[in-house]
Image: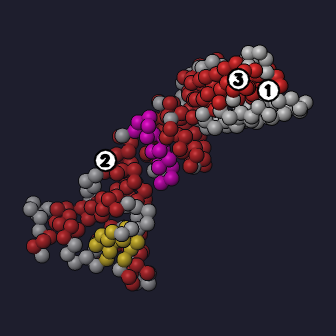
Amino acid sequence: MAARNSKDGSFASDMCALLTSREGADVTLVVGASQLPAHSLVLAARSPVFAAMLRNDTKEAGSRQIEITDVREDVLWQLLCFVYTDTVPKLGRMAAELLGAADKYDLPLLKKRCEEQLAQGLSVDNAAATSLLAVLHSCPELRSATVDFIVRHPEVMTSDGWIKVLRNNAEAAAQICSLVAAATPKNRTSSVEQTEDLSEWLAVAARTGDVGELRRLLAAGAPVDARDGAGCTALHLAAMDANPETVKCLLSAGADINAKDSSLQTPLHAAAYRGNLKAMWVLLTSSAQVDVRDRWGKTPLHWAAATKRVEAVRALLLAGASKKVKDNEDITPADTATSSTRELFRMY
């Protein structure tokens, strides 16, 4: 038994010695190619989930092996440290992953410590991912902390982390948006005070290129793809403006890059018609459909050529736009070329 005697003789250090010595271990946690010996009595006493696995009539009870498929080995080791000693040496680095594991194995104290650690470390870069964890693992205190943080830092809603949340879990993203909107003070901006129609104010902010106002309205719950009387979304309106940051802001918030207005024109049509080169490059590098046709059968290249937007024509041709697409009158973009753009159609 000497292997289990710690230097300071405390219960926690004795239990840590028991875990690391593997003395008397009667069950194995299998993580990929690795095996972590443990003591079934300790696991069952601490976790109702492990207790259920180790009942007499289960596969794990018979094989004395528990396969762990969704927790990394180093994270599982930290979880075992907590199970044995109530301490987590690397909590600061692994709180996010440990939160999910603590929830799965019904370890409420560990879960609470993870929540506290994550709440203390909130930033613009990680708030979106942390809010998702709070929703998925039913952490009301952490959820409240992340919502409050997002209300105070609306730029979270245009961060890369928020884009990932939108793409990977739209349902949770909608719940988070609803919570943020409910928590946003009514006097946060004059726009929100003066009207309940957030969509109308979002359109105004997009048209004027007010990125800060866009972020605040999106954080307050303004629908990013709401339409005006002509069927234009905020992204259509932003594409007409010279400020590319407005376009980037809306795309980061999940705006439909290929949304069509009542004339079946996309934001790229709008940017090409206006010759808004900066907005065009943002759209083109964000996978906008380059040869999409409107109600007249015209592509963005048709409109750029017809309005003599030389650099817009060049940009579309460089992006692979077809010179041969015919509109409803059998006219191609090349057919509309003028002296200023004709050479470009020959070059590309």
Quadrant for the N terminus in the image:
bottom left
The CA distance from mark 3 to mark 1 is 9 Å
Q: Which quadrant of the figure has residue 28?
A: bottom left
Residue 236 placement (x, y as % from top left): 70, 27
Query: Reading the chain from its start, which is encountered first: label 2 or label 3?
Result: 2
Q: How many marks?
A: 3
**Amino acid carrying mark 3 in the image:** Leu
Secondary structure mostly seen in magenta is helix
Picture residue at 34% right of the left edge, 51% below the top: 94
Picture residue at 65% right of the left edge, 30% below the top: 318
What residue would you read off at disc 1? 334
User: Are the two marked residues, 3 and 1, in contact with CB atoms closer than 8 angstroms?
Assistant: no
Magenta segment: 122-137
The CA distance from mark 2 to mark 1 is 61 Å
**Amino acid carrying mark 2 in the image:** Gly
Residue 145 placement (x, y as % from top left): 44, 40
**Amino acid carrying mark 1 in the image:** Ala
Q: Which mark is residue 344?
A: 3
- Residue 120, visible in the rendered structure: yes
Camera-side residue of 325 and 61: 325
Camera-side residue of 324 and 250: 324
Depicted 44 relative to depicted 132: above or below: below
Camera-side residue of 330 and 123: 330
The CA distance from mark 2 to mark 3 is 57 Å
Q: Is residue 338 magenta?
A: no
147 left or right of 83 in image? right
What residue would you read off at disc 2? 92
325 left or right of 127 in image? right
Query: Reading the chain from its start, which is encountered first: label 2 or label 1?
Result: 2
